[in-house]
Amino acid sequence: MSQRKLADVYGNEAVQAFGRALSLNLRTDKDYASLADLEYAEKPEQFADFLKRFLRRYEVPAAKREREGKKVFRPSDEQVRQIAALVDEVGVAPVRAALIAYALVWHERPTTENKEASTNE
Amino acid sequence: MIPTQYHVMKTGFEMADVCRVYGVAELLRKASLETGGPPHAPPRIRDASYMWLVDAPQVSMSEAVAQQVTTDITAPLGREHAKAPEGNSDVGWFLAHGWNYLYVTNQAKDKAKALDTLQQSLPRALWSLADPQKGGKAGTLTTPQGLETAGGKGSRAASRNTYGEGQSEMPGDHWAVAVVGAMAVGTYLWPKKGSGQGNLALVPVPADVTYDSHLEIRDDLRAGGILCPVSSTTAVAHFAVKLARHQSQRQADTTGWANRYSAVAYEAMAPTGQRPKPAHGGMFPMDALNALIGGTQESAARAEVVLGVWDKLLQTAGMNKGMETLALTLTDFLMHPTLSNLERHWRTHLRFSLREEGDKKRVRTFYPEAAMEGLMAHVTT
């Protein structure tokens, strides 16, 4: 296992993207099931399972917001690949800790998902 | 004034040792003030592994100075245990509070006898600091349980035939100096009757400390509010966080240097139907907190924010029934700073933050981004 600092893992672009998505789903859509899946992931295959379920659960409210004309944030394919590669490099525990930490950080208020006016006009 | 260096050897009775080194500093400071000593040369205490070094200006001792210092220290000690005064300016109250704690397991007549002994021993101890030739010989005295719970219960005799648990004894001068140090700098917690909680003694262990600046921190800690009462260990952890917070504030505000403490010595007693009995004790490590504070003003400023979050979390957990896991997981991390313990604490914090709006147990304390990154920079994956 790598002896990198947790700050390096936290600063990874893919971790930031998934952290943001998880934080949004937890606070806005009360997706506690994804939190439980993340907490129980110990091996890479279990983490892959968490990613799959989380992205599926994330899509439902995201699609609804999109239908309402709001801008929606989604982690990209590249970010999914990056986070999987990071898990292979440093293990599940640091990535899991960094994602949970993201939800405990005071961020600037979201400017896209909830606040943007409809773009249909 | 010629600077002098005192060597305070460690004996292994951790709480008594650390009280003794503070006692040396307190007596030197008081004697220096009585003799009009230099106001800007306070004693400095440094840990040299098997002993402490105390650097201070040489003291010009006289009978008058010895008696005045003794009177200043012992005059308030007859006070009964009373409610804490507003603020922390009543030095006499704190001396009496510490004295009552040291002799919490003794009867009134034993305490009165100990006070007589202290009044006789202190002048001798002061003379020995000024001039070892003039100190004179002191006998041995029983170590009070409030000063050192391990010493208070004694140790087994060498031979099985004579096993007993008679109390340990210490040289008279050591006892007097340790008692002065304990009264001057200790923090003592008395539980409410019937609460089931035990007594707790807390003393920061100096690594590199200027005594006057330690007294400022002591005063801030005394005014700092209730320590997390979930358990004695969470109270110790909360004290350590507050101590680190004061360190980091001073380091951030000044030239990047502040007192350094290696641990917080603590001893807990358990309540019984009669006198409190020794429960547990040890040294709560400050390594992780000191690493977080770092050596610069910038690192100290970032650390102060994280420590403020932890202070708030421990305070909140202590005030609300049902939030004990928040305090216990944070304490666990501070005692054993591993990634898994940190993650366990973060999970608990996150779950409390997701409670419904209006729930008293909902946590609204979060980390600013820069502070979280500063914390993570010290955590190895």
Image (cartoon, grey):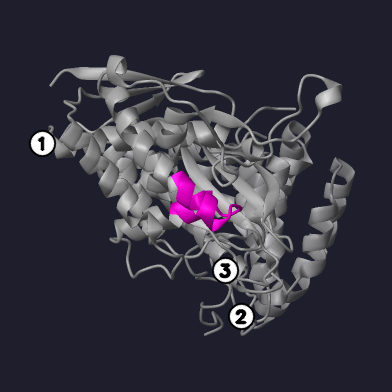
Task: Name the side, left or right, on which B92 lies relative to A23.
Answer: left
Amino acid type at circle 1 is Gly
Residues marked 2 and 3 touching at CB (< 8 Å): no
Q: Chain of mark 1?
A: B
Amino acid type at circle 3 is Thr
| Mark 3, other Cα within 10 Å: few <14 / some 14–19 / many ≥20 | many
Q: Nearer the viewer, residue B340 or A121?
A: B340
Q: Is residue B361 above or below residue B284?
A: below
Indicate the quadrant where residue A113 lies.
bottom right
Q: Chain of mark 2?
A: A
Task: Name the side, left or right, on which A85 lies relative to B192.
Answer: right
Residues marked 2 and 1 touching at CB (< 8 Å): no
Q: CA distance from mark 2 to mark 1?
A: 79 Å
Could you say where residue B239 lies in the image, as x and y percent from the top left? 51, 52
Label 1 sits on a secondary structure element that is: loop
Q: CA distance from mark 2 to mark 3?
A: 41 Å
Residue span colored magenta? B98-114
Q: Residue at x 34, y 20 (%)?
A: B6
Could you say where residue B217 lies in the image, as x and y percent from the top left? 35, 48
Whether discs 2 and 1 lie on one chain: the answer is: no
| Number of the label disc, if any, that sits on residue B316 | 3
| Mark 2, other Cα within 10 Å: few <14 / some 14–19 / many ≥20 | some
Q: Chain of mark 3?
A: B
Q: Is residue A91 above or below residue A64?
A: above
| Number of the label disc, if any, that sits on residue A69 | 2
Residue for badge 1: B36
Q: Residue at x 58, y 62 (%)?
A: B228
Could you say where residue B7 lies in the image, as x and y percent from the top left? 39, 18
- Kindly tell me whether residue B166 is visible in this rendering: yes
